[in-house]
Image (spheres, rainbow, N blue to C red):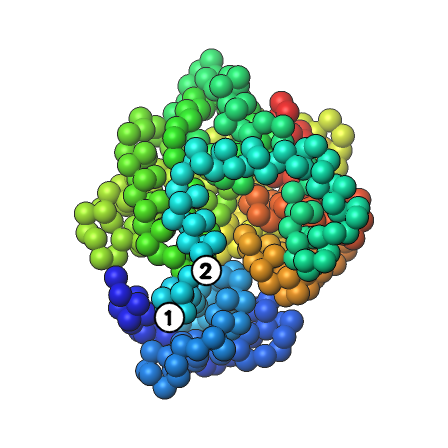
Amino acid sequence: METEQILKQQYDAVLRCNRCGFCQTACPTYAITGMEASVARGRNVLCRNVLEERLPLTKDLYAPLFECLLCRACTAHCFPAVRTDEIIVAARNAYYREHGQPAILKFLFREFLPDRRRMTHTMRFLTLGKRTGLSGLVRLTRILGLFGKQMMKAEQLVEKAPRRFLQDILPEMSLTPPRVRARVAYFNGCAINFAMPEVGAATIEFLTRNGCDVMTFDHCCCGLPAHSYGDLEAVRTMARQNIDAFEKLDADVILTDCSSCSSFLKEYPKRFDEDDEMRARAEKVVAKVRDFTELAVELEPDVAPMADKATITFHDPCHLSRYQGITKQPRDLIQATEGAEYIELPEADWCCGGAGSYCIAHYGLSEKTLDRKMGNVETTGARILATTCPSCIMHLRYGISQKRLPVRVLHLSQVLTDGGGPL
Ligand code: SF4
Ligand code: SF4
């Protein structure tokens, strides 16, 4: 599809912005800069001017377009519910067609993320430096600081590299319960597989304990990172691969414990607006997709009591609360856990500033967004901060370690299995 067509599809959406400015109070980037180009209204005006050919798509538009967190807080505060995130993604696509996509992004989205085998080989190599202590040594010498604060942060985001990925551990786990209530295909998202297998192990322990026959299968990245950078062609390649894989499954539910993956998988039909056959296939398979929080509540689960009583608060990932409208389920699950004292987090749905690679690419804005989140976490006095998105987990753990707060950041499935499953 040509750039012009992709952007024009958003023209009606852009026109629905009446410039009322209600989005100002909700937008994390506007809260930091106070600049009109940092809020949905300003971003939509710029896109409208580009579409009406009154403004060329120059490199000056990079910051307004790429500094948006795609958090959808604006849409939640907007009477016509303008989907600014979709407008921005289309504009990013147009921007890269105009100015060229950096080669590293092209490789990442076209060659790396669609190929799980290649990802596995590369990740084994990359995690070696972390495990052998080499990266810790580099941190101590502050050499990375010479390349900018972003590099220092990138090194610190993953606290410790796992010895084995989740895909290595799964064959050793018991995946079938004595009494089967549901057949669940587990979508093993990239971040959980390669960076936090203990989360996936806790999820699977929770599922099997509650009567789920868990099956694993070959699939690739859900495609969300490519979507965030406007590479819609790469997204369709990955979505096609995953839809083929989903169609071969004999499962009641396709489940993921990454809320970013679940929200994006559910939106696969939208990625095929121009292809009726693919859209119909996508609609059929994604009807089975559930976020962990949804299935966990539906199971009316047997939740492990916490061995040590703890105060717990919950951070709503944007892709869970705004993209999927799920807010009650995680709170209900925590409150049903014996030994857990739930404390509501002020501004629980305010973005943490992680947003995939945003926290590195837009270091300053991301740090300030995280500071606000950390301030709120501190006021609760909670000792556990739970959430359901691995990108949020990494960024929140980074914030907690920078502020030296006495708080553990856990995935909800770890809370429900008393801190972590078998690893
Ligand atoms: S995006 Fe929505 S809330 Fe913001 S100015 Fe436009 S119509 Fe108003
Ligand atoms: S998606 Fe988030 S960061 Fe982007 S304009 Fe809307 S509120 Fe602001």
Question: Which one is in front, 341 or 370?
Answer: 370
Look at 30% across and 43% down and name the residue there: 240
Q: Quadrant of residue 253?
A: top left
Element carrying mark 1: helix
Q: For the N terminus, which image quadrant?
A: bottom left
Please tell me the numbered disc located at residue 98. Answer: 1
- In the rendered image, residue 18, in percent from the top left (x then y), is placed at 41, 80
- Inspect this view and state whether residue 75 appears: yes
* Residue 5, position as x, y percentages in the image: 26, 68
The residue shown at (55%, 29%) is: 165
Q: Please state, as top left, top right, bottom left or bottom right, where the C terminus lies in the image.
A: top right
Q: CA distance from mark 2 to mark 1?
A: 12 Å
Residue 360 versus residue 399: which sits nearer the camera? 360
Amino acid tagged 2: Pro
Relative to 109, residue 289 above or below: above
Instruction: Report the disc number at residue 102.
Output: 2
Quarter where residue 194 is shown: top right
Side of 418 where 189 appears, left or right: left
| Type of the residue with mark 1 | Glu
Residue shown at 50%/39% (left/top)? Answer: 190
